[in-house]
Amino acid sequence: MTVAVTRTKAEQALSQNFEAVAAKLPGGEDVTQARKTAIGAFAALGLPHRRIEEWKYTDLRSALKEAFPAAVADDTGVTAAQIDAALEDLAGLDAHRMVFVNGVHRPQLSSVSGVKGLKVSPLGAALAETTDGLVRAAVPGQDAVIALNTAFMTDGALLQVADRTELAKPLLLVFARAGEAARLVTTRNIIRMGRGARATIIEAYVTLSGAVAGQTNALSEVVVGDRAHLMHTKVSLEGGAATHLASWIATLGADAGYRAFHLTAATGLARNHVAVAFKGEGAKLDISGAVLGRGGEHVDTTLFVDHAVPGCESRELFKSVLAERARGVFQGKVIVRPDAQKSDGKQMAQALMLSEEAEFDSKPELEIYADDVVCGHGSTAAEIDADLLFYLRARGIPLHDARAMLIESFIGEAIDKVEAEAVRGALSGIAKRRLVDLSA
């Protein structure tokens, strides 16, 4: 018996929208075929829903009521001052900058050329020349979202840091939304760190003042070579009506170091999916994040860490501050393969609940198939400690300021994981600005 699957309005619109823009998307014949294959895969899968284990707390099929037309070009007038205003404290960083507006590279707003040891180009241009490694990406449980990214991707950053190169300044990738039309913006970054290379890369997703919030599907594929070190940060500030779907897929070589950090605030529906696989012995992963949620915002952080080789270390720390009706989700799965002896993994997710209506769903998981390992995980959710609040107030600190201090201290542990002092300071500034409202 054949069972017909009823597709939602959004699912039908996504397939129809692809047909409308397919001829305008960048890439040669091979890329065009890959796009068609991807949209076909999505048509079979549909949007993720609660019956899929990885999406049980974030039913995208129900949450996504409509699919906006895809952005394939950008004709809006945007100035550097508008970009700086949207970046907030990140604008003050002494950094190389690569700017994309509505999913299209803006070279006149960028300043990243001529950096020794760094090869950088817009992905849109690269797709027209080669397909080698540019359309390969899949993660179980994230297949539908990645299929949509492959089908609709317009541009992004293609970065190669040469062997034994250390970038003196951070590289800031800015993805800005502008204009009065709600659009689906789809970008992909490919980051390749050569042997022994070191770099700090920041992805910032922002909506310019006066622009209409829309939908974002962003994917970053990262390869950290042997003995290379990458500090990789993402900031999402897209607006309370925005939908932000992000996928990070990283592989680590021998003795590699990968530090990652996510700051998510002022985004209506966000799903940050990070999959990291250890490919070489002695590699270290440290991933952390801070979520600041209010109103009806929904932020989902889902991790998959694969200890596939011996002697690797992973650390995960995520902090959520949830006010009003905000909902935070943390799913963290660490798997230790049979041959991955001497693996060391620690995971912690914590939430500070500022309202009785706020919700935090946490599902930490460990799958261990080796016997010589050190692994552990934990999760907590609590209100502001009344004794600590009383202690501060007894010393003359007003209630509002006392609450803000305690919240700042709570998320500060995660932000302190960021190695670069200037980047850490900018993230703290962005967070503090929002703590004023959360602590009210």
Image: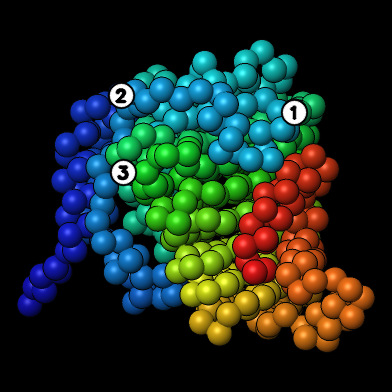
Above or below, 259 against 57 in this view is above
Measure the alpha-carbon separation of dots 2 and 3. 28 Å
- Element type at mark 1: loop
Colour convention of the picture: rainbow
Above or below, 340 against 198 in this view is below
Question: Could you tell me the amino acid type at mark 2?
Answer: Gly
Place residue 241 in its image quadrant: bottom left
Residue assigned mark 1: 94
Measure the alpha-carbon separation of dots 2 and 1. 37 Å
Question: Could you tell me the amino acid type at mark 1?
Answer: Asp
Number of the front mark, 2 or 1: 1
Q: Give the left or right position of residue 228, taking residue 33 as reference.
A: right
- Circle nearer the N terminus (2, 1): 2
* Residue placed most toward the observer, 291 or 29: 291
* Marks 1 and 3 close (CB-CB < 8 Å): no
Q: Give the left or right position of residue 205, taking residue 257 as reference.
A: left
Residue 267 % position (x, y) = 49, 56
Name the residue: 63% across, 66% down: 438
Name the residue: 56% across, 85% down: 356
Q: Residues within 10 Å of mark 3 (few under 14, many from 20)?
A: some
Residue assigned mark 3: 182
Number of the front mark, 1 or 3: 3
